[in-house]
Amino acid sequence: MKDTDTQVSVMLVQKHQLDQGEQQIGDLDNALEALQALQADNATQLDEMLLTMTALLRQRGIEPEEVEHTEICSTLFADPEPKTTSDIGIAPLSLLDAIPWHDNMSWATYSASVRHYAERHHINLESDPFERLMTPGQRADLERRIQQDFTLKTAHCDRYDYMIAGTCGVIGGLVDVFFVGMPGEGQLTHVADSAVDSAVEKFASACGWNGPSEGGDATKSAIGFLERQFKVNYDHRHGGDVDGLFRMSTRNHHIKSLAHSPDLVGLFFSILDQFTSTAHFVSDGKLVSVETETFELKGSNFVAKLFCGFVNWLGHLFSDVAGSSGAASRGSGIPIPFYSLLQFANVGEFGQHRQTFATIAVQVFEKGYDLRHGLAMAIPVLLTELLTRVMWVVKQRCYHRAPWSQCLPSANNPELRRMLMVGHGTLCLVDAGDAALRSGGDMIQFLLRTNLIGWARFGTLAVKELNAWYRAGKLDVDAVDDYLDADLRRMLGAA
C-alpha cells in the first residue's frame, strides 16, 4: 500500500468498523426482541399455570388464599434447570475488534494499527474507495451532482444573448476608438498618465520624499528622488553604456532591458542581475548578457538580500513608470507586462524597410505604447466585461425568472462564457477595423492603434471556449477547485 493511500485506508477501515458496529447493534436488537417475546410467552404460561393450580386447589376444597404464595411457586418451579441463550434461540454475541488509540499516538503508529486491522479482517485496501464508502444512492447523487455542476458543458445561447454580447462589445469598441486612440492623444490616456503620476508621488512620499521645491514639478521631483533611492546595476541608457554591443537609446532602453518589465520575467532578471552583477538585454531576437560593476545588495543573509533585491526592482519601476526626471515631455515609461517578450519574435518583413516584427514592436514602444497607455486600453476592456456580466444577470433575473442564487455572474457558466467571448471579440473587431482604416497599411501605425489588452483578453476567452467545446462532458477541474476552496473557507469560518 502506498503512503498516499493511508488516509483512504483509514476511511475504509473505519467504514468496516461502522458496518460491524451496525451489525452488532442489529444482533442486539434481535436478541432483545427474542427475549421480550420469550418473556411475554413465559408470562402467559405462568398465568395459565396459576389458573390451573387455582382450579385444582378448589376441587380439593382448598381456597388459594389459604396457601402461601411461596409454596405454589416451589411446586411450579421445582428442580429448575438453567437455560442458555442457545436453548432459547438467541445466538451468542462476540466483542467488537477495536483499534487502540490514545492522545499521544502518532499518525504512523495509528496507520500501522489500521493495516493490522485490515489484515485481520481481510479488507482490500486497494479497491475503489468510492465503491466501498458510498451507498448506491449516494453514488448516484454524486454522479448527478458532478454531471450538473462540475462537468464542462457547451453553451446554449439564444439570439438575445448574442445581441446583448455584441452590443456590449460595440460600446467598448467605440470607447476604445474615440477615447483611447493613439498613445498620448486620447482622453483616457491622459487620465491614465495623471493616475500614474499621482501613484509615483504617493510611493515617493511613502519612501521619505518631502515634496518638490518651490515652483518645481512634483512628479519630476518624485521621480528624481526614487532614481537616487533605488539605484540598480542594469540601468544602461544607450549603446555606449554596453560598449556598442548593440544599438540602444534612451527611448527604448526600458524595453531592451528585461529587468524593466513589470512582470515575473522582469522580477527574475532583476534579481539575477543584482546578485550576479550582470545586465540582460534583448537585441535582434537574442538574449544578451553584459557584465556590470560589482553590485552589492544590503542584507546579512540570502533572504534579506532577496528582499532588498525585490524592493530595488519595485522602487526602480516606480521611478521609470512615468518617464525620467529629465524628460522634456511625456517621457519613456516601462513596457506593458510581457510586452518585452515580443522582441524574441524576430520574424517577418514589414513596411518599406522590411523590418522584423521584433523591430516593429520596439518602435511602437518608442512612440508611447507603454504601461500608462496599457492602463488606458484596459478601461474599454473592463467596461465590456462589466456590461456583459451585468446584462447577463439582468436577463437571468428578469427574463428567465431565475432566483438570485443562480444569477451570480461566474465565468464557469457556459452561456456567460460564450457571451464574454462574443463581447470581447466584437470589441476587437471594432478596434481592428479602426486601426486598419486609420493606419493606411503602415504596420507601426496599425499596432499603435491596436488594443493589445483587448486582444489578450479575447485570446484567453477563445482558448477557454475551445477547451470547453473540445472537452464537453468531461470534468471541470477549475469548478471543482472553486467549490472545494469555498467549502474550506466555510468550514474555517464556522470553526
Image (cartoon, rainbow, N blue to C red):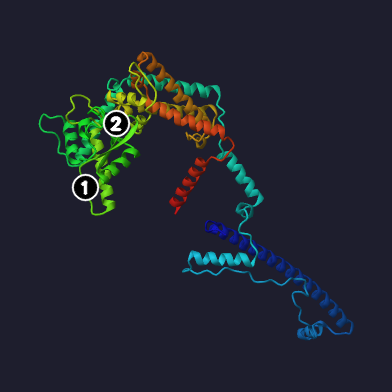
Image disc number at residue 423: none
How would you rate the neighbour count of disc 1 (Cα within 10 Å): few for under 14, some for 14-19, many for 20 or more?
some
Depth check: give the residue in front, 68 or 209. Answer: 209
Percent coordinates x, y for residue 210 in the rendering: 14, 38
Residue ID for mark 1: 296
Reply above or below: 31 against 132. Answer: below
Reply above or below: 89 against 282. Answer: below
Q: Is residue 17 visible?
A: yes
Q: Residue at x 67, y 71 (%)?
A: 94
Look at label 1 and name its amino acid: Glu
Look at label 2 and name its amino acid: Ile
Q: Secondary structure at mark 2?
A: helix
Q: Quadrant of the N terminus?
A: bottom right
Percent coordinates x, y for residue 54 in the rendering: 84, 79
Residue ID for mark 2: 255
Q: In which quarter of the view is residue 339 placed?
A: top left
Q: Residue at x 17, y 42 (%)?
A: 208
